[in-house]
Every structure is written in C-alpha cells, then in structure tokens.
Image (cartoon, grey):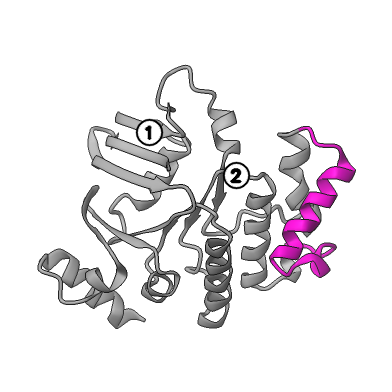
Amino acid sequence: MVLLQTRNLGMEYDGKPVLRGIDLDLAEGELKVVMGPSGCGKSTLLRCLNRLVTPTSGQIIFRDEDVTRPDTDVRALRQRIGFVFQNFALYRHLSVLDNVTLGLRKLRGMPLGEAVERAKHELRRMDMVEHHHKYPAQLSGGQKQRVAIARALAMDPAVLFFDEPTSALDPLMSREIINVINQLRRDNVSMLCVTHDLFLARSVGGRVLFLDQGVIHAEGDAEQLFGNHSDPRIRAFFSQEAGNQ
C-alpha cells in the first residue's frame, strides 16, 4: 500500500526553482534513499513533505489525503512524520529522557508517567535507556543520533525522515546508525533518507533516487546507480563521492 506520494511537486525560492516535477512513491514499510549533489534540493524535499515549507506547485498525498490543501492541519501532519535532523536538534538543557518525553507531553498531552514509559521503551529499542539521565553534552555523536531517533519513534509516526543521519559522525558511529536503520527496516518502519553516504546507501539496501538541480533523474537499486551508469551526471557524482570516502 502506498503511504506517501508526490505528483509534479515544485518548489521555488525568490522565483528560482529548487524542485521541479517531483514524482515520488513510498510504500508502507519501504525505505528509499535520496542522493545528489549539495544544493540539489534534497533537504528542501523533506521539508516540503512534512510542510515545514509550502510547495509552490504539485501535490503531496499522504495516506490518500492531499496535504497540500490550504485547510490541511499541518501540526497534525507533522506528528505523523518523524524527522531526524542532521545536527540531532536535542535540547541541551534537557536530559535524554526529557528530550524524548517533551513532544509526548506537549503535543500529545500524554500524562507524565505514560510518556516516561513510552520514552524508555524507545530508548531501550535504541540501546540508550541506561543513559536516560544524561544530558546531550555527555553523549557521543552516535548516542545523540540514537536519542534523536528514539524521540521521533516515541511519537509513533507513520514514516521516519532522515536528513544526512551520518554526516556529523565518524565511520564507527556511522556504522552504528546504519545498524539502527537496518533494524528499523526489519521492523517495517517506513523511511525516507537523504544522504551523501555511499556506504549507508549500499548497506541499507533501499531504492536510491538520484536528484540533481531539483529533478529526479533516476531511481534504482544502489548497485545499478553506483556502477558505470549511462547518465554522465550520475556517473560523475558517484565517482566523486566514492573518491571522498
């Protein structure tokens, strides 16, 4: 069953097109990876999909509902989409547990005891429950990312978005997060992941979309795109990225 679709999605900033004619389909329980050069529109795509920004044209269909309509309850939509940010976006003055329970209490109105129970469940799933009393400054980068994922999962989203989940991590911590994403995939969590990390894209095994200058030029298995592709833009991008890793 299709969870999320875009049809002819477009986005402009100051009259300059950033996304053009984006057609995307994400099924329930599916993982897709979006790759492309810096500035090609990858992060803008994620922000359009959860309505952090409003697309200029086209449609976003989320569980058969057009969420680009003016009367869309954007706040309710965002509660159904978990967003794991590149820089973790944890509150430095809050403990791990408080970071994870905050949305449950403030947005869902969940009683404290129930919120703590749910938060600890997700922290346990991320192997972080023993660190629940710590503050972000006391955690490694990989641990911060695990807390950010637990926070997103605690809201019981329909889909999880990752924006460059390994870019701030060293290779060892990146592999930790790849293991987490693979576990989530085995749990049939629907995910859309923006990344430059070729190793991540190969390791998680989802379909890869190549985005350049705001247009999706190709979609396929990682090895199909990473090999000697007939499109010179795709070939050049993956050759350069392979040389950087």
Question: Front-most of 212 and 186?
Answer: 186
x, y percentage for residue 147?
68, 61
Describe residue 89's horizontal placement relative to residue 193 as left or right. Answer: right
Q: Is residue 147 above or below residue 143?
A: above
Question: Front-most of 163 and 61?
Answer: 61
Q: Quadrant of residue 200?
A: bottom left
**What residue is at 71 percent from the left and 34 percent from the top?**
107
Q: Is residue 140 above or below residue 91?
A: below
Q: Over which residues does the magenta segment extend?
A: 109-136
Helix, strand or loop at label 1? It is strand
Q: Is residue 35 inside the magenta stretch?
A: no
Residue 134 visible in image:
yes
Q: Is residue 156 above or below residue 237?
A: above
What mark, if any, has residue 157 been given in the picture?
2
What mark, if any, has residue 210 been given in the picture?
none
Residue reaching furthest to the front: 1
Pointer 2 or 1: first along the chain: 1
x, y percentage for residue 38?
31, 60
Chief secondary structure of the magenta portion = helix
Instruction: For the N terminus, give its image quadrant.
Output: top left
Neighbor class of circle 2 (other Cα within 10 Å; few <14, some 14-19, many 20+) is some
**What residue is at 67 percent from the left and 55 percent from the top?**
90
What mark, if any, has residue 60 been given in the picture?
1
Q: Is residue 133 inside the magenta stretch?
A: yes
Neighbor class of circle 1 (other Cα within 10 Å; few <14, some 14-19, many 20+) is many
